[in-house]
Amino acid sequence: MRVVRPGDLNAGHLEIWRELRAKARTPENPFMEPEFTLAVGRVRSSARVAVVYDGGGPAGFFPYEMGALGRGRAIGFGVSDRQGVIGSPQLALGRGELMRCCGLSAWEFDNLEAGQSLFVPDAAAEYASFVIDVGAGYAAYEAALRLRSPKFFRTTTAKERRLGRQAGEVRFVFDERDPAALARLMEWKSAQYRRTGRRDRFAKDWITSLVHQLAHTRAPGCSGVLSVLYAGGRPVAAHFGLRSRTLLACWFPAYDPEFAKYSPGLVMHLRMAEAAAAAGIGTLDLGRGAAEYKDALKTGEIPVYEGAYTRPGAGAVLHWIGREPSRRAHGFVRERPRLAAFAQRGLKRAGRVRDDWTREVRSRTGGQPTGK
């Protein structure tokens, strides 16, 4: 094995990486392609790739991020929706050997790909990643949706018609290249994070930079796709995700709260499914995490895993202390719907208090930032 920075991989490495993914018996998820790792490497100095050699040539790749005291994480941890080792099923590789080569005392994952036999035994929890199958065409999907969720479909399409009557012609662009539309999406998403009391991902410079990097990425296995729903020429909902030849990984959806009564996010997802099918994409992966709109739109589920592999020693103890109690607490809440609903209401109240405080500070300082 040899550990390198993503940018040190040569053209031969990248071609073998793509060939290995093409032969894998798993969905063609763009997060597992080299372009995603290369983009993370440009914005995260901690990014590394272990290149596994067999018979003199590269036979596998393990992208990860190196933390303090050897505590490693999956590449792009926190925003990556699929993680794991890139290699053939026949690749002889041991976890301990891989961790020693990488200098890791622990490796943490939260969206481990199904079929990753090397690390699935270390999973502490299994979750469903919800998918929309449009492989038979959008008309077939819509017909099934009408049967499975007739009220949802009627309500959503009625709101789309009302949006057109009251706000102007509804228009959808599957692959929008306007940078202003991407900036608007990120503003909406940041506001949504704050409004619901969640951590604002776009407050982190590396995540913002990563999205901009991927927005300009154009490769068969990994391309950034910005989709926008317009009404009367004005953007009312948008989504940024990554696509491969056959799969669209849904990543950052958001909408303008001013148009919330029209459910523009749901309208956008239906239009997005239709456009994806027309572009030859067979699957939309909505990602893990329960949500009403996912339950309404999904046609199936695929498993993903959360957990960590730890080598015996002080580093493993530090990892457990720093991560496991929090993970177990979150899992305890998620598995109890009433408690989860109570926690969600608390987060929203906290978000409103934070927004009120921010507005008050800005009014007292003439709208100038406080530096805090």
Image (cartoon, helix red, strand yellow):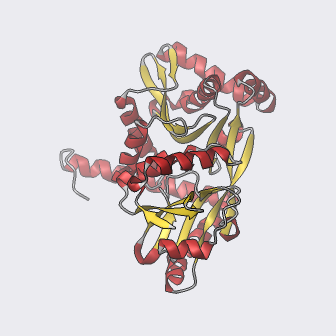
The quarter in which the C terminus is drawn is bottom left
- Tell me what residue is drawn at x 54 percent, y 81 percent: 316
- Tell me what residue is drawn at x 64 percent, y 46 percent: 291
Residue 363 percent coordinates (x, y): 23, 46
Residue 371 percent coordinates (x, y): 22, 57
Residue furthest to the front? 56
Identify which residue, 124 or 96, lies in the foreground.
96
How many numbered discs?
0
Residue 72 percent coordinates (x, y): 49, 69
Query: Which quadrant holds residue 333?
Result: bottom right
Q: Determine whether, in the image, residue 7 is placed left or right of residue 257.
A: left
- Tell me what residue is drawn at x 56 percent, y 43 percent: 30
Residue furthest to the right? 147
Identify which residue, 308 or 48, lies in the foreground.
48
- Tell me what residue is drawn at x 60 percent, y 45 percent: 19
Task: Using the rendered image of the protein, determine whether residue 323 is visible from the camera's viewpoint.
Answer: no
Identify which residue, 183 or 9, lies in the foreground.
9
Compared with 286, 317 (above or below) is below
Query: Which quadrant holds residue 95?
Result: bottom right
Residue 253 percent coordinates (x, y): 51, 38
